[in-house]
Amino acid sequence: MKILLIGGTGTISMAITNLLARRGEEVVLLNRGNRSKEIPEGVKVINADINNEEEVSGILDGMTFDCVGEFIGFVPSQVERDVRLFTGKTKQYIYISSASAYHKPCSSYIINEGTSLANPYWQYSRDKIACEEYLMDCYRKNGFPVTIVRPSHTYDQRSVPLGVHGSKGSWQVIKRIMDGKPVIIHGDGESLWTMTHNSDLAKAYAGLIGNPHAIGEAFQITNDETLTWNQIYSVIASILGKPLKAVHVSSEFLASVSDYDYEGSLIGDKACSVVFDNRKIKKAVPGFVPEVRFEQGVRASIEYILAHPEYQIEDPEFDQWCDRVIETLEKAKEALKNG
C-alpha cells in the first residue's frame, strides 16, 4: 500500500513510520524535515509545509494514496484544508484526535467510543472535537473516507510521561527525584490513569489502514493497564533508585497559581479517573494486544534519556515554581497548626 503520513516523526507517528517501513509498505512523509536523520531507510520524504496549501497541492498533483494519516491537524481549518487536498486522492484518511475530547467531568470512569465528547476546560480538546465533527459530516454527506483515532497519554523513549511538569518537558521532575527534592503530584494521587507506549499504538493504527470496517468510525487506542498517579511516580522513583518525596496539591490550586495550562491538562484530562474499554479496536484489529507495561516502557525511556544529554532539558523556572508552591503549603500548614 502507498501511505502518506503528514508529519510522521512525532511521538506517535514515528513508531507508525518505523512499523510500516519494516512491513515493506510504500511510506511517504510530508513534513518540514526537522528530524530527517531518524527516518528509516526506504521512506520517501516530501519536504513541505502542509499549511502552504497551494504549494502542497502542486507537489501532490497526480498522486493518489491508499491511506493518508494526519498527525498535526489541531484546528478545523487544518482538516478543512485536508479535505480539499485529498478528496478523490485517497481511499482512507486517518485523523489523530485525542481521548481528552471525552466528556469532562466524566459521568463514568469507564470510557469507550460511545462516551460523549465535551470538554469545557481545554481549548485543545474542543478544537479536536470540532475537527472530528467536521470530518464525520464530510463522511456522511460526501463519503469522505475518514477514520478517527483517539489516543490517550502516549510516550516514547525520548520523554518520561508525567502529570505535573513545566513547558520544557518532564526532565526537571526526574532531576528533582534524583536530587532528593520533593515533587508535586496533582490531587491525592489516587485518580486512575493509563500510559500507552507508542509501539503498542502503532500496531493498532497499522491494523486500521486499509481496513473497510474502519471507514466512518472512531477508535480509541490505549494500553489496558490502569495505574494511579502515586503508582506512576513510585515506579519512576524506584527505577531511579531514589525515594519518592511526594507533595500532593489539588489540581484546582495548581491551575490557579501557574501560567502553564493545568486547567486543561489536569482538570480537563489527567486529574480525571479513566479506564479505557478497548474492545472496539480489538474487534477491528484481531490479535491486537498492548504488550508494553508502564514499568517496562518508562524504564527504557529513563535509560535512554540518561544516556542522551540532549534530552535532559533543564527548566529552572519550573523548578523554582515547585519550590515556591511547596514552601507556601508548608508555611500554611505551620500557620494553621500554631493557630
Image (cartoon, rainbow, N blue to C red):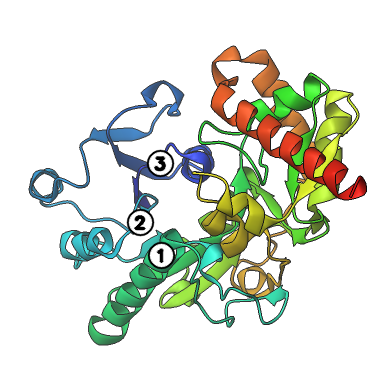
The span from disc 3 to disc 2 (Cα, nearest Å) is 15 Å
- The outermost residue toward the bottom is 141
Q: Is residue 204 above or below residue 116?
A: above
Could you tell me the amino acid type at mark 3?
Gly
Q: Nearer the viewer, residue 208 or 108?
A: 108
Residue occupying image coordinates x 28% and y 74%: 144
Q: Are marks 2 and 1 in contact (CB under 8 Å)?
A: yes
Residue occupying image coordinates x 47% and y 68%: 211
Q: Position of residue 310 (x, y in %)?
A: 54, 16
Q: Position of residue 87 (x, y in %)?
A: 20, 67
Q: Nearer the viewer, residue 73 or 337?
A: 337
Q: Position of residue 206 (x, y in %)?
A: 52, 55
**Residue identifier under label 1:** 128
Could you tell me the amino acid type at mark 1?
Lys
Of badges 3 and 2, the one in the foreground is: 2
**Residue identifier under label 2:** 74
Count neighbours of disc 1 (C-alpha within 10 A) and say few if under 14, some if 14 to 19, many if 20 or more: many
The dot on residue 8 is: 3
